[in-house]
Image: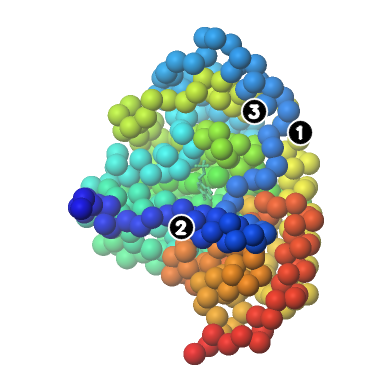
Amino acid sequence: MLKPARRLERSSTQFFATLNHKVASLQAEGHDIIRLDVGSPDLPPAPHILQALAEAAARPDQHGYQPHNATSALRRAWASMYARLYEVDLDADTQVIPLIGSKEGIFHLNLALVDEGDLVLIPDPGYLTYTQGALVSGGEPYYLPLLPERKFLPDLDAVPPEIARQARLLWLNYPNNPTAAIASLEFFEEAVDFARKHGILICHDAAYTQVAFDGYQPPSLLAVPGAVDVAIEFNTLSKSHNMAGWRVGAALGNPEALRLLYKVKTNADSGHFLPVLEAATVALTEDQSWLEERNRIYSSRRDLLVTGLRRLGFNVESPQASLYLWCLVPEGWTSSQFATAMLEQAHISLTPGVVFGQGGEGYLRLTLAQPEQRLMQVLQRLENWNWREQNYAT
Ligand SMILES: Cc1ncc(COP(=O)(O)O)c(C=O)c1O
C-alpha cells in the first residue's frame, strides 16, 4: 500500500470528480440526467475563434513546446482587453501571465507565497480551489463568512488584527461563485485599503466578469487606483468566451507576485499548445459583439428558471451576473440530502451549497449552462417529483 503524503491527506478529491462517477453510473442504468451542477458553458466559442484554431493546428510548425509565459501577442491581447473594458493600463511583459486555465494559477500561487502555518483568507462559501491550494501548501484557511444580509460580501473590518497580521493572501471573487453576488468598485477600494494596511496580497478571481446581464458591467479590482501594488486578478476565457476546455486563463497585476508564480510554473508545466494561444489571441482582440447575444441567452434562461422555480415555491434570487442561481433549500432538508434525492429520484444533478463550505449550507447551486428546452424539463420533473411528501427532518 502506498502511503499518501501528509499534504495530500489534508486535501480531498474534488467534489465534481466524485459526482461525475455517480452521474456516469446512473446514466449507465439508462437514466437521462440533466446536469445543472458544473459551470461549464454549453455553447461554443464564436466561429472566427474556431477557425483560427483549425488554421493554426493545420500548420506544421505549431506543435512544439511554448514559453511558460506563452506568446507576447497573447499577453498584449490580455492587456489590451483590460485597457478596453476597464481602462486599466498593464505592462504586457511584467503584469500579465497566461495560465493553463485560471485554476492552475489559483492553485500554484499558494506554492509560491504560502508557507507552513501561514493564514489564507478565504470566502465561505467559495470556489473549492482556494481552500485546496492553501491546504496543499501547508497553509491554514481562515474563513470569511459571506452572508445574505451583507449581500455576500465579506466584512473585512471584522477580521481580527492578529489574524490579518498572519495572513498572506485574501481571496475575493465577484461576480461570485457560488452565490452569484456582485461587488462594487467601492467594495474593492475597501479591500485594497485593507490589503495595504496589513501587507496582504489580494487575489481577485474575476472568472465571471464578462458573464453579466441587463446592461450590468462588473468592475475589475485592478481599476482601483494603486491596486496593482497589492493585488493580482485571475481572468479566464472559460466562461467569458465559452472556452472552458481550452484551458486558457491569465493572472494580471502585481509584477512581484507574477514573477514568483512564473517561477513555480517554469517547474510545473511546459506551456500551452500554440494554436490554442493563437486562437485565444483572436478571441481577445477580434469581434466581441457575439458576447452580448450569448449573455442575452443566459439571461433568458435565468428568467425562465427563476420564474419556474418561484412558481414551484422555491426561494431564489435573480442574479445580475455569473452562470449560477443560488437557491434556498426547502425547509427540513440539508443541501446534500436534497441534491442527492433530486439526482436519484428526479434525475437532475445540481450542487449542494455545503460543497463550497459550511457557509453554503442551506443553499443549492444551479447553472444556466443548459438550453431552455432542458430547463423546461427540469421544471416539469420538479413539478412531478413528490419531494414535499418526503421528510428528512429527523
Ligand atoms: C470562481 C471560479 N474561479 C476559477 C474557475 C476556474 O476556471 P478555469 O480554470 O477554467 O479558468 C472557476 C471554474 O468554474 C470558477 O468558478
The three-letter amino acid code for the residue at tag 2 is Thr
Tell me the SS state at disc 3.
helix
In terms of depth relative to the viewer, which is nearer, 23 or 160?
23
Classify mark 1 as within 8 Å of ligand 1 or not, answering yes or no: no
* Mark closer to the observer (2, 1): 2
Task: Characterize the local packing of mark 3: few (<14), some (14-19) or many (20 or more) Cα atoms within 10 angstroms.
Answer: many
State how far apart marks 2 and 3 are (Cα): 33 Å
Percent x, y of residue 98: 47, 30
- Residue under the point 61% across and 36% down: 243
Q: Mark 3 against mark 1, which lies toward the viewer?
A: 3
Which residue type carries mark 1?
A: Ser
Q: CA distance from mark 2 to mark 1?
A: 37 Å
For this rendering, which residue is in front, 124 or 391?
A: 391
| Dot 2 crowding, Cα within 10 Å, few <14, some 14–19, many 20+ | few
Labelled pair 2, 3 in contact (Cβ < 8 Å): no
Percent x, y of residue 108: 35, 40
First in sequence, mark 2 or 3: give its number. 2
What numbered label is drawn on residue 247?
none
Which residue is at a point 73% across and 69% down the rendered structure image? 381
Q: Does residue 252 appear in this view?
A: no
Residue reaching furthest to the front: 29
Mark 1, residue position: 289
Mark 3 vs 1, N-terminal side: 3
Question: x and y percent of residue 50 in the render?
Answer: 67, 26
Q: Position of residue 182 (x, y in %)?
A: 60, 56
Q: Which residue is mark 2?
A: 18
At 63% across and 52% down in the image, what residue appears? 322
Q: Amino acid at mark 3?
A: Ala
Query: Mark 2 or 3, which is nearer the eye?
Result: 2
Mark 3 vs mark 1, CA separation in Å = 11 Å
Residue that numbered label 3 is attached to = 283
